[in-house]
Image (spheres, grey):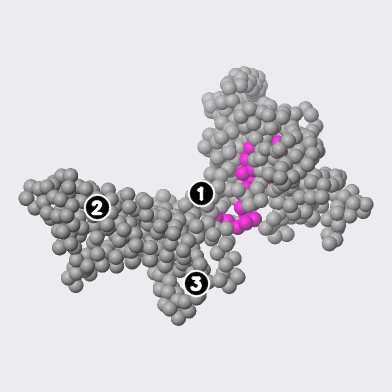
């Protein structure tokens, strides 16, 4: 099995005449926590949307496990999506369903589990994010941090190979954010899940990231790449240095 | 000790032939299951069969799950382990796990984290308790809703009265837009429906009146029933479906996306900024719609009259002039004003009180139409009683 779980080649994204990303290329290793950072409007979320298949880039290739994600047929695409778990910025929980129903929806689609087993998985997943006893609650009945954790439980329902996070710590208090970071590290360590995280929360970046790419508007792509320690000390690139050292 | 080996070959949903080999070791007291690889969701069907197999081996007192071969697994490992533990508990069998490795222990510890918050367990309550609890909460909710609407209505009246003193307090510039959307744009559908209503009333009436030789009274029937009742009622129902629901959805979406909260924190009054322009627009648009629809509906009745009865257009209009009093038209217009006010107020009330997400907007929008139609019929009944009592 190839160690590179995701390969992105010359990815370009244009919205009309506006070019957000230009010839972006990078690779993500299996089992690593890969963080995408950058200032507002640099294309972080745009890049994530291409990776999870919500948008089709103007040009370029995305390979997931050596399969061309942009060229696969519907069936193969679904098999690839089976490997994904996505935690959206606002959670993306279905408001008309309870937390249990949100998780069971995915399990019912992709597994042969019977109702009893699905209920067991729901309890396990909710317990793993500290939400035991909330299975019959609707998203509107729980707090923002709990919504995020419930959404993570749903994203983890199928034990995906790759977990994508869009701003996981946004709207969370430092303690909840730290506990989420701890959970991300544990899942990565125990299951070997590849984590791709879009964030600009420096505390989170320093706690969880193993490798980082920093996007910047000026280059419409990757300005720097490396470990958090390397980028924090990168004095010859002021934009990077200032970002990681919070210098305005 | 004797040694048993079972081999199962089962096809799974994914249409792939999968083979799982189980190994059992057993003596009279003890059954050891060497759990095969991989213990994953995709093999759930195979593992479920295991329960039927061991259920037939009732003699053992201890069940040992041997994880020594386990390298590939996912959350299903815990489901499997828990199901077996439950299975043993129900049959009074001692359950043990052997050769569990660090990876398995880590997964188990991660997946069985202690809950952070204790929550009321509804499953402990009886079905009857839950039924009455649900009925009770629905009744309380209905009363609360009525109470809240009356409070909202009172506040709305207060703001309207305040408008007389401070006429510039509301956003008059929004009025033409709302008037156009609620009134002018509702014209095509209301005209079509009320014309057909006039036509139907005319045809149905003509069949009956012809039997008594009272052909000329078709004008009375169509004119009075449309002006007093049918036209205001039908227009109100259509406006409730168009504008009432639109207000609920629009304001509901604003509520969910915190736009109304933003307005409040910026010092704007949501009544003056959002509610009053909408309510006034619909209230003022309704009489215009009803007048136009009266004419169109009477024209529909005329078509029925001249095609089924021996009546001329001039005769129909002449009879209508005699039959229709100003009060017949006036009562319809008074009703339309009130209907418009109620529809818009209810739509805004529902929108402003949306709680939750996108689904809540849908629920409140539906509720605005249902409650709107109910309010229209209720107020129409009250009007009929009042007008009868005072003889108009």
Q: Which residue is mark 3?
A: B170
The crowding category of the residue bearing disc 1, from other C-alpha atoms within 10 Å (few below 14, some 14 to 19, many at least 20), is some
Q: Which residues are magenta?
A: A140-165
Subunit under mark 1 = A
Do marks 3 and 1 both belong to one polypeptide chain?
no
Foreground of the two, A59 or B217: B217
Crowding at mark 2 (Cα within 10 Å: few <14, some 14-19, many 20+): many
Q: Is residue B185 left or right of residue A247?
A: left
Q: Nearer the viewer, mark 3 or mark 1?
A: 3
Q: Earlier in the sequence, mark 3 or mark 2?
A: 3
Image coords of residue B247 (percent x, y) = 46, 59
Could you say where residue B56 lies in the image, as x and y percent from the top left? Answer: 53, 25
- Which residue in the protein does label 2 denote? B299
Q: Quadrant of the C terminus of chain A?
A: bottom right
Q: Residue furthest bottom?
A: B165
Say which mark, if any, is on residue B50: none
Residue A10 shows in the view? yes
Circle nearer the viewer, 2 or 1: 2
Q: Chain of mark 3?
A: B
- Spatial CA distance of label 2 from label 1 is 47 Å
- Viewer-proximal residue, A43 or B72? A43
Q: CA distance from mark 3 to mark 1?
A: 36 Å
Residue occupying image coordinates x 58% and y 48%: A93
Which residue occupies the foreground of this view, B205 or A115? B205
Image point 68% across, 44% down: which residue?
A16
Eyeballing the image, is A83 above or below A205? Answer: above
**Residue B297 x %, y %:** 26, 54
Which residue position is annotated with label 1? A96
């Amino acid at each position: 099995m190839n160690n590179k779980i995701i390969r992105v080649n010359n990815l370009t994204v244009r919205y009309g005449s506006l070019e957000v990303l230009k010839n972006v290329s990078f690779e993500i290793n299996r089992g690593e926590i890969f963080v995408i950072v950058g200032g507002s409007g640099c294309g972080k979320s745009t890049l994530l949307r291409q990776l999870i298949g919500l948008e089709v880039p103007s040009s370029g290739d995305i390979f997931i496990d050596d399969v061309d994600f942009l060229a696969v047929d519907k069936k193969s695409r679904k098999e690839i999506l089976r490997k994904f778990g996505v935690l959206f910025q606002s959670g993306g929980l279905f408001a008309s369903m309870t937390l249990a129903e949100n998780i069971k929806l995915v399990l019912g689609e992709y597994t042969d589990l019977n109702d009893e087993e699905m209920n067991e998985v729901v309890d396990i997943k909710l317990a793993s994010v500290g939400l035991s006893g909330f299975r019959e609650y609707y998203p509107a009945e729980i707090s923002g941090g709990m919504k995020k954790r419930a959404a993570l439980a749903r994203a983890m329902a199928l034990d995906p190979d790759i977990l994508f996070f869009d701003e996981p710590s946004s709207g969370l208090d430092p303690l909840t954010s730290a506990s989420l970071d701890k959970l991300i590290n544990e899942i990565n360590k125990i299951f070997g899940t590849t984590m791709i995280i879009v964030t600009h929360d420096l505390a989170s970046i320093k706690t969880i990231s193993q490798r980082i790419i920093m996007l910047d508007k000026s280059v419409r792509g990757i300005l720097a790449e490396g470990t958090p320690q390397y980028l924090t000390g990168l004095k010859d690139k002021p934009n990077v240095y200032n970002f990681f050292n919070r210098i305005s | 000790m004797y040694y048993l080996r079972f081999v199962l070959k089962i096809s799974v949903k994914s249409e792939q032939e999968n083979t799982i080999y189980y190994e059992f070791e057993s003596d009279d007291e003890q059954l050891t299951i060497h759990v095969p690889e991989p213990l994953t969701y995709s093999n759930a069907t195979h593992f479920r069969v295991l329960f039927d197999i061991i259920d037939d081996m009732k003699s053992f007192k201890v069940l040992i799950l041997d994880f020594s071969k386990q390298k590939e697994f996912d959350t299903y490992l815990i489901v499997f382990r828990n199901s077996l533990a439950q299975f043993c508990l129900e049959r009074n069998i001692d359950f043990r796990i052997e050769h569990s490795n660090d990876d398995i222990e880590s997964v188990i510890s991660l997946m069985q984290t202690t809950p952070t918050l204790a929550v009321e367990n509804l499953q402990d309550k009886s079905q009857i308790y839950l039924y009455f609890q649900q009925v009770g909460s629905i009744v309380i909710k209905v009363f609360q809703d009525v109470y809240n609407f009356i409070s909202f209505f009172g506040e709305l009246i207060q703001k309207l009265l305040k408008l007389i003193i401070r006429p510039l307090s509301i956003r008059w510039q929004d009025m033409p837009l709302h008037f156009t959307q609620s009134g002018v744009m509702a014209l095509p559908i209301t005209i079509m429906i009320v014309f057909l209503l006039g036509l139907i009333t005319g045809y149905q009436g003509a069949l009956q009146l012809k039997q008594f030789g009272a052909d000329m009274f078709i004008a009375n029937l169509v004119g009075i029933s449309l002006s007093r009742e049918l036209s205001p009622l039908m227009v109100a129902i259509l406006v409730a479906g168009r504008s009432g629901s639109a207000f609920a959805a629009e304001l509901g979406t604003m509520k969910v996306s915190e736009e109304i909260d933003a307005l409040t924190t910026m010092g704007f009054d949501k009544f003056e900024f959002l509610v009053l322009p909408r309510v006034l627009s619909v209230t003022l648009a309704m009489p215009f719609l009803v007048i136009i629809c009266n004419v169109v509906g009477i024209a529909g009745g005329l078509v029925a009259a001249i095609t089924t009865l021996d009546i001329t257009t001039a005769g129909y209009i002449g009879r209508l002039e005699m039959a229709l009093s100003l009060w017949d038209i006036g009562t319809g217009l008074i009703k339309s004003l009130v209907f418009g006010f109620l529809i818009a107020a209810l739509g805004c009330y529902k929108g402003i009180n949306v709680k939750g997400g996108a689904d809540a907007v849908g629920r409140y929008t539906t509720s605005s139409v249902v409650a709107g139609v109910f309010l229209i019929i209720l107020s129409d009944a009250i009007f009929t009683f009042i007008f009868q009592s005072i003889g108009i």
